Image: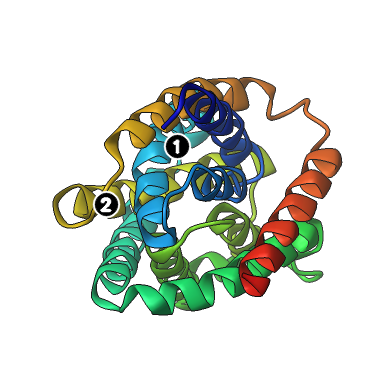
Amino acid sequence: MSPGEALAVFAAGLAGGTVNVIVGSGSLITFPTLLAAGFEPVRANVTNTIGLVAGTITGTIGYRRELEGQGGRVRSLGVFSLAGGITGAMLLLVLPGSVFETVVPLLILMACGLVALQPRLSRPAPHPDSDREHSRWLPVTVFLTGVYGGYFGAAQGVILIALLGIFLEDHLQRLNALKNLLAALVNGVAALIFVFAADVAWGAAATLAAGAIVGGHVGAKVARRIPTPVLRTVIVVVGTAVAVRLLVG
């Protein structure tokens, strides 16, 4: 990477780490930046996963107070997140790179749609049911989200916060803390697999991680004050532009 590209990757890591804690779609900033720096899509994806995992851990630590009393949820859902992350990461490694290059623009467009619809998706059901938390559908959907997160991951957090808002009755900040932890598990196990089995751009990953660590800390501090509608709009516009660019070649 040139010095300018390295600076852009660091700045993307800073922004992506912040956004992941708050909204959960930081990869829509970091992944296009790695593509712009000249990395091919699959290599950019694995580098992105490894680079951002430190930021998700930082953000989770910053939200540790909101995790108090959620040990049971962490243990029960964490297993499904880990299993999903392993499955998604293995799919990325086993399937031809051409498959990823074909589907990634569609995944980005889907992620942008989820970001745009997040407020509606995250709205609890009109008739709360105390049995929702014990529904078999929650772990199943958490597993499937983990598969998506291990394979690509953009807006994984958006999907998780929507699911948790539907199935769990709790304060949004506590659900956001749980979302951050589950996403960290998915990203962490996928990153571990990629370290040993994928072609990683280590310089870019380290630069991205440096920015993401700071961003995760910042995100945990400002998550209650940042104007998320503005942030959401920027993410959707940028992500859509990237997807269209990839589709038209």
103 shown above or below 241: below
Q: Amino acid at mark 2?
A: Val
Q: Image quadrant for the N terminus?
A: top left
Residue at the location (22% across, 56% down)?
198
Q: Residues within 10 Å of mark 1 (few under 14, many from 20)?
A: many
Q: Secondary structure at mark 1?
A: helix
Q: Nearer the viewer, residue 241 or 154?
A: 241
Q: Nearer the viewer, residue 20 or 65?
A: 20
Residue at the location (47% across, 22% down)?
3
Q: Can residue 123 be seen from the camera position used here?
A: no
Q: Can residue 193 be seen from the camera position used here?
A: yes
Number of labels in the image equals 2
Q: Image quadrant for the C terminus?
A: bottom right
Q: Earlier in the sequence, mark 1 or mark 2?
A: 1
Residue at the location (33% across, 61% down)?
85
Image position, residue 46 (x, y; %): 35, 53
Q: Nearer the viewer, residue 28 or 141?
A: 28
Image position, residue 62 (x, y; %): 50, 24
Q: Amino acid at mark 1?
A: Thr
149 shown above or below 232: below
Image position, residue 59 (x, y; %): 49, 30
Image position, residue 230 (x, y; %): 85, 40
**Which residue, given by chain and number where applicable, does mark 1 sit on?**
56
Q: Is residue 10 left or right of residue 195?
A: right
Residue 189 is marked as 2
Q: Secondary structure at mark 2?
A: helix
Q: Residues within 10 Å of mark 2 (few under 14, many from 20)?
A: many
Q: CA distance from mark 1 to mark 2?
A: 12 Å
16 shown above or below 185: above
Instruction: Name the image quarter holding residue 206.
Output: top left
Residue 29 is marked as none
